[in-house]
Image (cartoon, coloured by chain):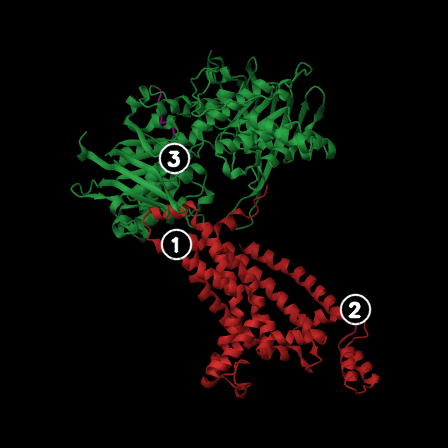
């Protein structure tokens, strides 16, 4: 097992390098750079810009150097924990992101827990009561959730919350708490504001998870070993939880790989609609304005989390499912 | 026959299954009894309702099935005055749960799927003990290991912590039996317990069941379609047909003088080692193949070929696997096929027999060029074309594929559910550009007639056919290109006895009428004896004995062949299996072999030596005269 983990860790290094090259290339691909976009924007507003100042800035940040050299400077910086400088915010990237990161993580974690709490009982119910009215009804609601665009749901709930409860639910907390230390009042405000975003962001994921859990569990319920368990006299609920449910959890563990990056990227579109102070809108803005170090570091961060997430889910699968660790390497 | 001694009495039991809005009665008014300490065999084809009866006794009927009438009276020997009616109990009630697994237990057919792959063998065996006896911890573990030892695990301590996938089929079935018996039930239901196992393993498991029955004093309800197994195990027999009990009584009475026409037909449909070669099996529902006029003249002219149609020499193939429990560990090579040589003469049926994993299917795949060989040659010569099969590439390979076709084991998995029978039958012709359009459908219609199916069924999909019919479609597909060589890889092992007879008769007729050459792969010696002309016996990737049918069955030389023959259960009551030898998978039988056959001993390498005309045996030297019985 140790060998396997070490091997997987080593394999992650070239993967990350490849990703960093791709990310850099993609960011460089659109014509121009941040300063040209900046100049164009200023000129559109009728202001003039001193070309010398731009030249100086470009030189300062190494934009006149060849592509390869800039790439290695960027990667080298990241290895030392220097993620570069955000031109737009005129702050180091780590400061810009850091502020929003913890809010994003809070929102995402609550969303994930919400998803699990809703999806598991419904998925199990649907599978064990297949083709009953309950199954049809829940499936229908689930499909609605899957099919409704998140931002639309966000707008509708935004409107309804305002009309029915008179609360404005944009942002993650009342404006007066922003940048304040955590307090009971701030916590309550956050909890109040969190409800709608969590529902909106969680709906599609919940619906998807119900469908997958139901399908997986239905497959497993057919299996002979479930009958074996019943024949031993195991009570129905325990037989369900111990055997087929555990078998159908593989997809769920495999999901961890994609959960981690999702936690950090923080549902961009919904975050913009609801003006949430998460990292999502930040990334979009950075990409639009070609704020390359901010965007690049962010994408790299997501890629790293994906790689780590997949690694964690692979190791967890190997621990939980003896078939995977016993069958590994058996080839024809 | 006092009713008081009966452990279980099924009285006028009726069960129906809900299908959409209607319901279908699958068990009609069935009555039989299981005396205490005796074995009762429930015999019938698949779909006759025998498994449903077993499920109703355990209270584990599927949700769609319902008991509509009758009683299942169970008298627990621990509480002889207290009789309970299982049919009236709620399946999930505490009382029923206490019976299930505690007093009545079951062993299923498929040892591969009846154990959960995620839980350790020991935990699964122990579970019933924890539930019914309120024993846990080290005491439970000790009892479990004792039980594992009793069913023949060599190292119960280690076996406890193993996962089912680390065990062979035979050991898994032993684990299932341990699980069923851990609470010392009064009644064990064995639902086709050996159908999925090899003959020698089958003999071991049957012997184990018998000895445990004697040791624990329980009753056994044996559900099977294999009359050979019934003859060797049962005290009483219940024959069931379409949900109705047609005949019941003591074993001798039923086997010596079967009263019901169905019982007699069932007996005649089983190929037996004692049958004459030209005696034909009588299928329960026969169908006659029609040889279409266009194929009549096709009988192949083999006179042009001198020598074999297929000559296999020194064929080897190994698979790479990995040892060790937690990733890593050295990779191991398993020789699936090890230096195999044989000839297939034109017009003959060459049988290959062996237990699962002996490499017989690998050989068929190598000949089909579905996988690549490590070394060796396969020479094919049909008189007009001759080629080295393993060297073929590109167009030559594609052209060669027409010459050899295969019929697979699983008739359900080998037909695409999304294409009509017409498409299935004309696809080979289209791929090879042989015919198109009208000629194609005419050809397909002829093929259907050839295998005894209705031409009007051509536009149906596979799901509307039964297993036997699907297998006939598989044969028709293989014959579409009129190949020189037909490989049948276990074509009847997934089918019922009655259907099996149909398919075997069909293959025999086709071989005779079309002049086919066949390689027939099977683990069932009786089936191979019925159909093959010459037989090769395989063990662990090597051919251990080759001879024509009469010689092999009358005068086997190799100890492995002898042990295989000894393990086949027959329906003759005067020749029951000897269960005393079969002491488990634990013990390698090769250790008891005479030195000249023993693998892994220093000295000359093993090779095929001739003991008589066309009779070869894998040995170090010519076996001594007394071993070659006259």
Q: Residue B192 carries which label?
A: 3
Q: Which mark is residue A67?
A: 2
In the image, the chain rendered in green is B
Q: Mark 3 lies on which chain?
A: B
Does the rendering let one see residue B296? yes
Distance of label 3 from label 1 (alpha carbons): 26 Å
Highlighted magenta segment, given as a residue range: B575-582
Colour displayed for chain A in the image of the structure:
red
Question: Are marks 3 and 2 in one subunit?
Answer: no
Which residue occupies the extreme left position in the image? B81
The N terminus of chain B is located in which quarter?
A: top left
Nearest the eye: B522 or A59: B522
Measured from the top left, where is residue B36 in percent x and y?
A: 23, 34
Helix, strand or loop at mark 2? helix
Which mark is in front, 1 or 2? 1
Q: Dot 1 corresponds to which residue? A: A240
B581 inside magenta stretch? yes
Query: Marks 3 and 2: CB-CB under 8 Å?
Result: no
């Amino acid at each position: 097992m140790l060998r396997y983990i070490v091997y997987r860790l080593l394999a992650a290094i070239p993967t990350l390098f490849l990703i960093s090259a791709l990310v850099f290339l993609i960011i460089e691909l659109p014509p121009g750079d941040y300063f040209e976009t900046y100049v164009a924007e200023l000129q559109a507003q009728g202001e003039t810009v001193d070309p010398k100042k731009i030249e100086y800035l470009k030189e300062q940040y190494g934009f006149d150097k060849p592509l390869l050299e800039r790439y290695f400077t960027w990667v080298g910086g990241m290895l030392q924990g220097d993620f570069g400088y955000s031109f737009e915010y005129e702050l180091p990237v780590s400061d810009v992101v850091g502020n929003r990161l913890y809010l994003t993580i809070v929102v995402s974690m609550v969303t994930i827990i919400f998803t699990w709490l809703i999806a598991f009982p419904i998925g199990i119910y649907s599978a064990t009561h297949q083709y009953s009215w309950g199954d049809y009804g829940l499936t229908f609601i689930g499909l609605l959730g899957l099919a409704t665009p998140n931002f639309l749901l966000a707008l509708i709930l935004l409107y309804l919350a305002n009309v029915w409860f008179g609360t404005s639910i944009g942002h993650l907390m009342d404006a007066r708490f922003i940048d304040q230390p955590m307090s009971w009042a701030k916590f309550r405000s956050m909890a109040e504001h969190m409800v709608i975003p969590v529902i909106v962001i969680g709906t599609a994921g919940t619906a998807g998870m119900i469908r997958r859990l139901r399908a997986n569990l239905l497959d497993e319920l057919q299996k002979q070993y479930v009958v074996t368990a019943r024949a031993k006299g195991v009570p129905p609920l325990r037989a369900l939880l111990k055997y087929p449910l555990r078998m159908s959890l593989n997809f769920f563990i495999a999901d961890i790989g994609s959960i981690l990056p999702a936690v950090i990227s923080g549902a961009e579109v919904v975050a913009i609609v609801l003006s949430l102070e998460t990292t999502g809108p930040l990334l979009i803005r950075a990409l639009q304005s070609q704020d390359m170090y901010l965007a690049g570091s962010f994408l790299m961060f997501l890629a790293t989390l994906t790689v780590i997430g997949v690694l964690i889910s692979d190791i967890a699968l190997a621990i939980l499912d003896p078939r995977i660790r016993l069958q590994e390497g058996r080839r024809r | 026959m006092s009713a008081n001694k009966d452990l279980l009495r099924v009285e006028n039991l009726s069960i129906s299954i809900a299908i959409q809005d209607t319901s279908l009665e699958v068990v009609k008014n069935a009555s039989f009894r299981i005396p205490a300490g005796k074995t009762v065999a429930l015999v019938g084809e698949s779909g006759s309702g025998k498994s449903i009866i077993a499920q109703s006794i355990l209270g584990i009927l599927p949700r769609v099935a319902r008991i509509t009438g009758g009683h299942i009276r169970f008298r627990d020997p621990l509480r002889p005055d207290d009789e309970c009616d299982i049919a009236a109990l709620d399946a999930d009630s505490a009382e029923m749960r206490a019976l299930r697994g505690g007093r009545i237990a079951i062993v299923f057919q498929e040892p591969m799927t009846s154990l959960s792959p995620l839980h350790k063998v020991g935990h699964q065996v122990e579970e019933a003990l924890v539930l019914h006896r309120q024993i846990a911890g080290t005491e439970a573990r000790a009892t479990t290991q004792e039980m594992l030892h009793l069913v023949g695990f060599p190292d119960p301590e280690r076996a406890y912590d193993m996962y089912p996938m680390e065990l062979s089929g035979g050991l898994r079935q032993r684990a299932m039996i341990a699980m069923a018996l851990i609470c010392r039930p009064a009644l064990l239901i064995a639902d086709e317990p050996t159908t999925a196992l090899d003959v020698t393993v089958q003999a071991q498991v049957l012997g184990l069941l018998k000895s445990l029955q004697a040791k624990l004093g329980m009753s056994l309800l044996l559900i099977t379609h294999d009359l050979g197994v019934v003859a060797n195990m049962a005290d009483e027999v219940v024959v069931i047909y379409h949900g109705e009990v047609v005949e019941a009584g003591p074993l001798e009475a039923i086997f010596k003088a079967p009263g019901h026409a169905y019982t007699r037909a069932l007996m005649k449909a089983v190929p037996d080692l004692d049958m004459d070669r030209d005696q034909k099996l009588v299928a329960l529902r026969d169908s006659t193949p029609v040889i279409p006029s266009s194929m009549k003249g096709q009988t192949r002219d083999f006179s042009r070929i001198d020598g074999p149609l297929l000559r296999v020499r020194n064929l080897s193939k190994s698979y790479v696997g990995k040892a060790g429990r937690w990733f890593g560990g050295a990779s191991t090579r398993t020789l699936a096929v090890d230096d195999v040589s044989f000839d297939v003469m034109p017009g003959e049926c060459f049988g290959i027999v062996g237990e699962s994993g002996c490499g017989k299917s690998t050989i068929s795949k190598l000949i089909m060029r579905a996988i690549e060989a490590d070394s060796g040659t396969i020479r094919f010569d049909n008189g007009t074309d001759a080629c080295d099969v393993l060297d073929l590439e590109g167009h030559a390979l594609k052209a060669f594929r027409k010459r050899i076709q295969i019929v697979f084991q699983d008739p359900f998995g080998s037909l695409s559910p999304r294409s009509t029978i017409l498409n299935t039958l004309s696809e080979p012709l289209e791929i090879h550009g042989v015919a198109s359009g009208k000629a194609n459908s005419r050809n397909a219609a002829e093929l259907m007639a050839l295998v005894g199916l209705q031409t009007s069924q051509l536009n149906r999909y596979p799901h509307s056919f039964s297993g036997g019919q699907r297998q006939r479609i598989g044969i028709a597909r293989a014959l579409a290109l009129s190949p020189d060589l037909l490989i049948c890889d276990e074509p009847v092992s997934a089918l019922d006895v009655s259907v099996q007879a149909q398919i075997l008769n069909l293959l025999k007729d086709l071989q005779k009428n079309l002049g086919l050459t066949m390689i027939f792969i099977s683990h069932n010696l009786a089936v191979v004896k019925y159909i093959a002309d010459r037989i090769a016996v395989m063990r662990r990737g090597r051919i251990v004995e080759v001879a024509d049918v009469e010689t092999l069955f009358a005068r086997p030389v190799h100890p492995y062949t002898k042990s295989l023959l000894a393990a086949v259960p027959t329906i003759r009551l005067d020749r029951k299996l000897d269960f005393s030898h079969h002491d488990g998978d634990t013990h390698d039988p090769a250790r008891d072999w005479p030195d000249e056959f023993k693998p892994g001993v220093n000295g000359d390498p093993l090779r095929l030596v001739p003991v008589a005309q066309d009779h070869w045996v894998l040995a170090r030297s010519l076996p001594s005269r007394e071993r070659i019985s006259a």
